Amino acid sequence: MFNKDRWIEIFEAISKNKLRTILSGFTVALGILIFTVLLGMGNGLHNSFLTSFVDDAQNIIFVRVGRTSKANKGFQEGRQLQLKNEDMSFIKDNNIGKVEYLTPRVYLGVNAKYKKESGSYTIRSVNPDHQYLEKTIIMKGRYLNDSDIEKRSKNIVIGRLVENDLFKKEDALEKYLNIDGIAYKVVGVFQDSGGDNEERVIYLPYTTAQLLFGNNDHLDQINLSYNMSMSTEQAIAFSDKIEEDFKKKFKVAPDDQSAVRVSSFAEGIKDTLVVLGGINIVIFFVGIGTLISGVIGIGNIMTFTVKERTKELGIRKALGATPRSIVGMILQEAMLITFIAGYVGLLMGIISLKLIGNNLEDFFILNPYVDTPIIILATITLIFAGLLAGYIPARKASRIKPIVALRDE
């Protein structure tokens, strides 16, 4: 390996056979390049999947109700169901130890004003648990607390862009915002990873909304998170149980799909992971196929190399070269070409992914990347596979008889 004379001979052989060397390296570089890009695309799909959950906790369950589509137990179809405050206790009491956080939602479309500025915004009326389900990050001030719920306070928490829209360069904290003719005190400003729409939301205690905008105990939706110790299958079963419980409570037919709608991220995560798993398997086998084609290319070219150098190898043997030295020389040349070409292919693959960036976001490929250890392992594997592919012609070359080799044309 560290024989100086051998390295000189290898470089001389490479310089005299530039086309052969380029062809050998090209198959290897192309294999690593394609493998790297395909793997990066797979990771880009995974990133795109993760961003769909960035705004909410991944263990969240949504409970909504609508109109019945089937008659059941004396009730006609088309009956409008309504969630109420008592339904939050109904969930907790029937699932002791399984619920982590739980919050109602009451939606309102309002017009908000501050001095000369005004705009239309969505109010989400919630309780303090909502902060953990929505992954709301408080920039200044505080979030809604239990006292706000109990006292039905007119305190609100506004999104970063609401502050930018209405307060301009002023600090909104402790200021009063006029919402449909009623003054509300801003006690907090938040940011959200869900995008601009999520940062143009105003949070209000749900008890306040019920009092001022209907004087009732109606809820539009209930969100909850389950205990993270649950497996995906257990979480899906938990979600199904909640739906079953509400159908029994509202006397809804078991096969009525529109009256009670309970959904969880666990179902989406499971389905998406199955799809991503299938895509990754396809990518893996296609990538392996390109690597194998590179190995085959090395083997074919090394076979041609040995045939081309038959007379030279015969002379070497006639001068006392051992079979082992001939095998070592050919394998060392194959390893050098494979290593350099593999590194070039890896570098080109990484650069390609950097250039792609988020340009394929419309195709659900977001920020494609590769795990360096995996690619390095693939390159090392390719090098050893290339050595194995080159070993057969090298061994054949070591068995050449000098007299036969010297007669070769």
Image: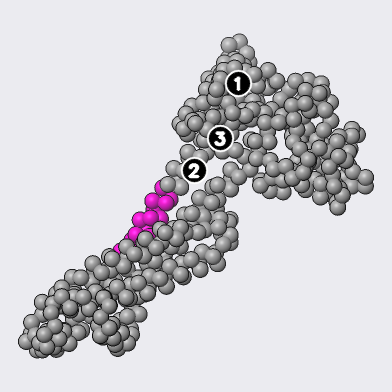
Q: Is residue 38 visible?
A: no
Q: Which badge, 1 or 3, is on the more N-terminal residue? A: 3
Identify the residue under disc 2.
272
Identify the residue under disc 1.
91
The percent position of residue 27, horizontal first and vertical second, equals 34, 72
What separation in Å lies between label 1 and label 3 (alpha carbons)?
Answer: 16 Å
Magenta stretch, main secondary structure, is helix
Please say whether residue 286 is one of the residues in the magenta stretch.
yes
| Magenta region | 278-292
View extreme (right): residue: 115
Q: Residues within 10 Å of mark 1 (few under 14, many from 20)?
A: some
For the point 52% across and 22% down, the residue is 241
Quadrant housing residue 190: top right
**Mark nearer the viewer, 2 or 1:** 1
Q: Is residue 134 visible?
A: yes
For the point 16% across and 84% down, the residue is 313
Task: Name the residue type under label 3.
Answer: Asn
The answer to whether residue 275 is left or right of residue 98 is left
**Measured along the vertical axis of the image, is residue 39 above or below residue 185?**
below
Q: Which badge, 2 or 1, is on the more N-terminal residue? A: 1
Identify the residue under disc 3.
59
For the point 54% across and 29% down, the residue is 227
